[in-house]
């Protein structure tokens, strides 16, 4: 496979600088273990900020992800999910919890038992301008910006401190302040991820003229970690194996499996730059069973192993714009 160009195209950098976030804070939640709530699929992108304590979040039928104080979770496609103090705790639909325990005048929700406490800031958001479809589809179902990520922590920690002060003070107008701070968190998380997880130059290969190939690309971007075969993709496109391979290469410029490999590895670069997940965890997230095979493929594509790539990014973090006017 050709080595990936890790320099960002001017067009992508310019687009990311323009991306701003407009968020709405739904509630500030004080939970006491045991607790759990479920949110259904919706077209609205969602986020959660863990201000205090710990939680567990699972999307769809996926496994739970442990969260701790300072973590920001972004669900850019609005997928349904479950949040609990820990896996196994009782779960109720959020709308039923809100019906039985309405938020107070300050937008605060208190719920749960008598155990360890967790404080969450929950809301939804929109991007202005909206990302092109090819770029939006590259975002994972769930993006966790870890509190301990080097570079970003130094920049975000003062804002987290201010957010914590506001939640404790409960002053009038706090919701508006929460929303503004969430705008900053979300914009930085999305820009940082997309700046690294360049969508394999998808914007340079428009495929709208071939809707069958466009449908397959959407599947690959939604689930790059799945065990796709050429036969699977050809069936999804409604073609024979040979016809699919020829038309895919004509539309995209590379064979299907080469495209999938590049998609997995660029998404891995995004995870390495914006999370503290270890190399084995990143490998599994992007569809590799073996850390060794992932590291070999990543080194071939980016010219250095995943660990070196992460250290390079943390040593000289690049914030792709942070004006949220």
Image: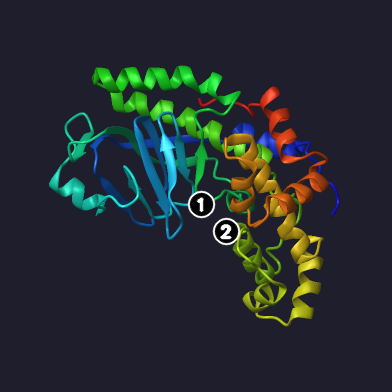
Looking at the image, residue 114 sits to the left or right of residue 23; the answer is: left
- Find residue 141 and name its label: 1
Q: Quadrant of residue 192?
A: top right
The answer to whether residue 203 shows anywhere in this view is no
Q: Quadrant of residue 154?
A: top right
The answer to whether residue 282 shows anywhere in this view is yes
Q: Position of residue 54 (x, y in %)?
A: 36, 35
- Find residue 222 and name its label: 2
- Pointers 2 and 1 in contact (CB under 8 A)? yes
Residue reaching furthest to the right:
2
User: As displayed, is residue 234 above or below residue 161?
Assistant: below
Looking at the image, residue 7 sits to the left or right of residue 150; the answer is: right
> Which of pointers 2 and 1 lies earlier in the amino acid sequence?
1
- Find residue 293 and name its label: none
Tag 2: Cα neighbours inside 10 Å, few (<14), some, or many (≥20)? some
Identify the residue at image location x=57%, y=35%. 276
Q: Position of residue 191 (x, y in %)?
A: 60, 35
Q: Secondary structure at mark 2?
A: helix
Looking at the image, residue 11 sits to the left or right of residue 81; the answer is: right
Identify the residue at image location x=23%, y=37%. 32
């Amino acid at each position: 496979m050709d080595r990936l160009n890790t320099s960002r195209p001017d067009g992508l950098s310019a687009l990311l600088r323009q991306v701003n976030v407009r968020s709405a804070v739904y509630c500030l939640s004080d939970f006491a273990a045991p607790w759990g709530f479920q949110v259904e699929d919706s077209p609205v992108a969602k986020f959660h900020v863990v201000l205090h304590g710990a939680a567990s979040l699972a999307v769809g039928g996926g496994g739970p992800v442990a969260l701790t104080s300072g973590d920001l979770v972004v669900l850019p496609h609005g997928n349904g999910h479950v949040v609990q103090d820990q896996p196994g705790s009782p779960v109720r639909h959020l709308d039923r919890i809100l019906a039985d325990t309405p938020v107070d005048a300050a937008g605060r929700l208190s719920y749960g038992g008598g155990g360890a406490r967790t404080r969450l800031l929950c809301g939804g958001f929109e991007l202005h301008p909206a990302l092109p479809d090819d770029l939006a589809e590259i975002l994972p179902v769930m993006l966790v910006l870890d509190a301990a990520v080097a570079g970003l922590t130094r920049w975000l920690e003062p804002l987290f401190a201010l957010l914590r002060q506001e939640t404790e003070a409960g002053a009038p107008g706090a919701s508006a302040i929460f929303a503004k701070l969430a705008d900053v968190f979300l914009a930085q998380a999305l820009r940082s991820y997309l700046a690294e997880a360049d969508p394999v130059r998808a914007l340079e290969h428009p495929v709208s003229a071939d809707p069958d190939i466009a449908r397959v690309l959407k599947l690959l971007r939604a689930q790059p970690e799945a065990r796709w075969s050429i036969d699977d993709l050809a069936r999804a496109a409604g073609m024979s194996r040979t016809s699919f391979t020829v038309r895919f290469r004509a539309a995209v410029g590379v064979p299907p499996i080469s495209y999938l490999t590049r998609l997995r590895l660029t998404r891995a670069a995004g995870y390495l730059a914006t999370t503290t997940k270890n190399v084995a965890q990143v490998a599994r997230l992007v569809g590799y069973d073996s850390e060794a095979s992932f590291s070999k493929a990543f080194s071939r594509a980016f010219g250095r192993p995943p660990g070196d790539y992460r250290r390079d990014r943390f040593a000289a973090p690049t914030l792709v714009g942070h004006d949220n006017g």
